[in-house]
Image (spheres, rainbow, N blue to C red):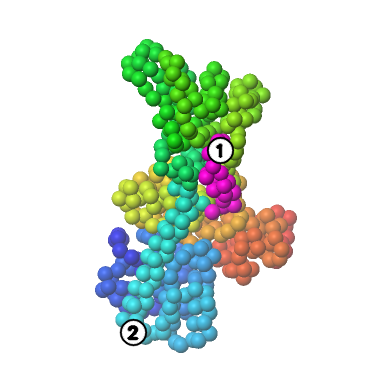
Amino acid sequence: MSGTGPWVYVVDDDPFARDGVADLVRSAGLMIKTFASGEEFLAAPRPKPPSCLVLDVNLPGLNGLDLQQELANADAQVPIIFLTGHGDIPMTVRAVKAGAANFLTKPFDDEELLKAIRQCIAFRDKERLYLESEIRSECKFEEIVGKSNALQRVLEQVSIVAPTDSTVLLQGETGTGKELIARALHNLSPRKDRNFVRLNCAAIPSGLLESELFGHEKGAFTGALLQKKGRFELADGGTLFLDEIGDISLELQPKLLRALQEHEFERLGSTRTIQVNVRIIAATHRDLTEMIRKNQFREDLFYRLNVFPVEIPPLRQRREDIPLLVHYFVSKLSRRMGKKINSISRPAMEILANASWPGNVRELENLIERAVILTQGEELNVPMAELKNAMPAPRTSSVCSFHDDERRSVSSFHDAERQTIINALKAASGRVAGPRGAAERLRLKRTTLQHKMRRLGITIADYDTRGSAVA
């Protein structure tokens, strides 16, 4: 089954009602998929996330309200229209309080149901636009996305120092976004309308780095066929970003120190002193204080650079930003590649959020780019095999109740959910309820957890290593 329009899912055990809704939805030009029970809905792979779920309340087994709770536990934001065979005011109140978009009584009016479905689809589209605008609002500093406390502290420092001309030293691991912070410092400064000049000191051979920094005259050395301005001259009036400053050789460091202190230098092959007005931002992933102890970096140069130090946290210290970053990169890259990708499975997102990311944001962006390339439908196809060996110990913070089709990383959704619950029970010494019990660890109600345990066939033997359990 394929299609590019909005999808409507129908869960109803009455085949006549189910087929009637399906025919009505198809007549409106929408995509439809039907299920006879809540269990079938959870177990079946779905072609794409629905824009609307039409759900019978009185289902056998897992009823409509229980299924709604399962979706809520999995943080699956799906607008739901409940159908019931008789007017039930208490049931209606419960459903609406739990977040139902609408509640209709059978036999329903076709136009009324279609109107409710279209409202759900419009709400879903509005919600997606809101998410994109929320991501953009987190992006006041160009492409810096996130709202974690660790990142916000950095951005507060940026806001404080940006309006000044003080030298800033950015320190952090590779891939943490030091250049984005440097650009933000420039864009928020009075120099924002002048040049922002970048030089990666590690990318230039040491013999050529002096020429790149200060320029040279024609004939200054073999191959110098023309006069060349250096980065200091090009950045005059603006900002010079010296990336990987820790890779500058000891021989060149005194000349750089003089340029920073005196704001003047000479081109190679010239005796004419050139004065410039440049704001310096430097960055490194190295421990400069350790390099000083090893006589690999000048102490006086370090103090000249370290006027306002900013430590940029690695991605593993701001994991709450990973979902925002994933959505941002998927949106940006899918537009660039002409694809329409609007969802990612919750288990896949949890795996991304728990990965170690030694390459930080850059590594995450590269993986999302590969995922967008691999994706053929509208749900992101995350290459799980690349992350399998980079995962830390399993967390027991939540249960994935919304089935996905990532069978390359786990044999099935139910296996993953079952193992997560067992791990939580073991960590809680077999306690289901109470403080630090499995239900609290999983952020579930006790009754919901017990229902899941029965459904998944979890017994005391699966999690109790002592031979007894505390309910």
Q: Which residues are magenta?
A: 147-169
271 relative to 328, above or below: above
Q: Is residue 225 visible?
A: yes
Q: Is residue 209 visible?
A: no
> Mark 2: which secondary structure?
loop
Q: Nearer the viewer, residue 221 or 33?
A: 221
Q: Is residue 25 left or right of residue 155?
A: left
- Does 135 lie within the magenta span? no
Q: Neighbour class for label 1 at 10 Å: few (<14), some, many (≥20)?
A: some
Which marked residue is nearer to the observer: mark 1 or mark 2?
1
Give the quadrant of the C terminus: bottom right
- Does 159 lie within the magenta span? yes
Mark 2 — residue? 109
Q: Which one is earlier in the sequence, the residue at label 1 or at label 2?
A: 2
Residue 411 image offset from top left, x and y in percent: 48, 52
Q: What mark, if any, has residue 269 been given in the picture?
A: none
Q: Residue at x 47, y 75 (%)?
A: 100
Residue 353 image offset from top left, x and y in percent: 53, 50
Mark 1 — residue? 166
Q: Residue at x 46, y 70 (%)?
A: 38
Q: Nearer the viewer, residue 321 or 41?
A: 321
- Identified by mark 2, the residue type is Asp
